[in-house]
Amino acid sequence: MQVPPAISANLLPLVGFVIAKKVCKSACARNRAKRRVREAYRTMRLTNTNFNETLAQWYALVFVLNNKILDADWAEVQKTVQDSLRKANDKYARSKEAKRESKQV
């Protein structure tokens, strides 16, 4: 039995990219779609420091892709990743007061 190593805080959140075989039959196209969104997420995380602070509160993120990603241009992919993270943050983010209260308890 193997015990997984402890997850470092700088690796959080864990991020997954999923595209169903039903959406796109070709494995090559599915992998290309995942690579595009993965790179958009990576560049967004490196360039936007304000997102790094809000992303640190999440444990795991899963991007579920559809076939429109294959025809989208690069700017649209980046904008979609940023918009989806902003929407998730607006809907599910803990407020700063809630964070302080959880640390005090």
Image: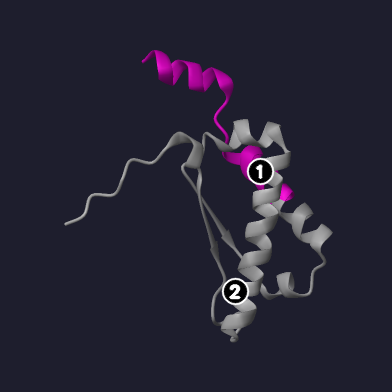
**Three-letter amino acid code at the position of disc 1:** Arg
Residue at horizontal 83 percent and vertical 58 percent from the top: 75
When asked about the image quadrant of residue 32, the answer is: bottom right
Residue 65 at x, y percent in the picture: 62, 67
| Residue at image location 45% in from the left, 16% down from the top | 101
Q: Which residues are magenta?
A: 82-105
**Is 94 part of what is drawn in magenta?**
yes
Would you say the residues marked 2 and 1 are in contact, meaning their CB atoms lie under 8 Å apart?
no
- In this rendered view, identify the residue nearer to me: 84 or 12: 12
**Residue at 66% over, 43% down:** 45
Residue 45 marker? 1
Which mark identifies residue 31? 2
Q: Position of residue 7 (x, y in %)?
A: 38, 41
Taking the view exactly as shown, the residue that stands out farthest to the top is: 104
Disc number placed over residue 37 in the picture, else none: none
Q: Taken as a whole, is the magenta stretch helix, strand or loop?
A: helix
Is 104 situated left or right of 11 in this image?
Answer: left
Please tell me how crowded label 1 is: few (under 14), some (14-19), or many (20+) other residues with Cα within 10 Å: some
Please give left or right for residue 76 compared with residue 62 in the image. Answer: right
Can residue 12 be seen by looking at this rendering? Answer: no
Whether residue 43 is visible here, answered yes or no, is yes
Classify mark 2: residues with Cα within 10 Å, few (<14), some (14-19) or many (20+): few
Residue 99 placed where, x, y %? 50, 22
Of the 4 image quadrants, the one containing the N terminus is bottom left
Magenta includes 2? no
Q: What's under tag 2, amino acid-wise?
A: Asn
Q: Quadrant of residue 39?
A: bottom right
- Which residue is drawn at the image coordinates 57% and 39% (left, top)? 92
Q: Earlier in the sequence, mark 2 or mark 1?
A: 2
